[in-house]
Amino acid sequence: MVKCMIIDDEKAAIDVLINYVSKIDLLELVATAMNPITGVDLINRHKPDLVFLDIQMEEMNGIDIIKIVGNHTKVIFCTAYSDFALDAFDYEAVDYLMKPIAFPRFMKAVQRAVSIIMAGKVAVVDAIPNDYIFIKTEQRGKLVKINYNEIDFIEGQKNYVAFHKGKEKIMTLLNLKDVEDRLPKNIFVRVHRSFIVPFHNIISIENNILRLRNRVEQVPIGTSFKDQLVSRTRDSTMK
């Protein structure tokens, strides 16, 4: 079962979603909230897999909530406003549904969310420190072994993660936070919302740009990740 929640400041909108959720056996509705602050508390309490979330609410909007709850809870935005669509996908929202929401469109979004949630639970099926991982690829039933020392960098691309190794790019249906949590911290470092790099592959750091061995791409350093990178380099820096 996929545990889900609904947060919307309009009761009529919540009632529509409750009805839709009740038609999908795979979904288990654990809570609803009309107040966004209460909604955040309920997310922390119930730890749902998926939240159907309004955007425009008093006290706190949907983007604020997704920043707080992070990537462990997947979000489908349900809103009458198109203005926030780009921001929503920047924060790895699964989908962005415009009200009034038709059930077939709702069902399509749920199927996508369930695929991502289940992939996140099983895609990384093995991890051995300082050695390799197996990942589940886009091709059904196919697992690929990737040695850590083969990875040039890892890139988050919306609902996918790309493992770059040489001329090859291997895609898997995950988010970057799930990958980061499973990789050994002594080998990999997250340097940006969209990038993880093997520490040994960094050849230079200039301002907010990384250059990597054997790659022409320049990897940006995100402001919120810079302290972590600096901390990792400090012990090895000759002064």
Image: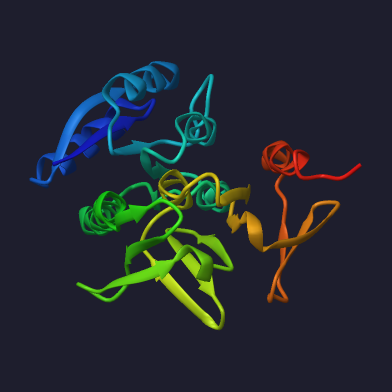
Q: Quadrant of the N terminus?
A: top left
Residue 73 visible in the picture: yes
Residue 192 visible in the picture: no
User: Residue at coordinates 75% horizontally, 39% vertically from top-left?
Assistant: 235
Q: Residue furthest bottom?
A: 167
Picture quadrant where residue 153 is located? bottom right
Residue 71: x and y in percent read 44, 41
Residue 160: x and y in percent read 43, 62
Q: Residue 163 or 103: which is nearer the viewer? A: 163
Q: Residue 25 or 201: which is nearer the viewer? A: 201
User: Residue at coordinates 57% horizontally, 48% vertically from top-left?
Assistant: 87
Q: Residue 3 or 59: which is nearer the viewer? A: 3
Residue 205: x and y in percent read 81, 55
Is residue 82 positioned above or below 141 on the image? above
User: Residue at coordinates 56% horizontally, 79% vertically from top-left?
Assistant: 166
User: Residue at coordinates 28% horizontally, 32% vertically from top-left?
Assistant: 48
Instruction: Determine whether, in the image, residue 195 is placed left or right of residue 141.
Output: right
- Model colouring: rainbow
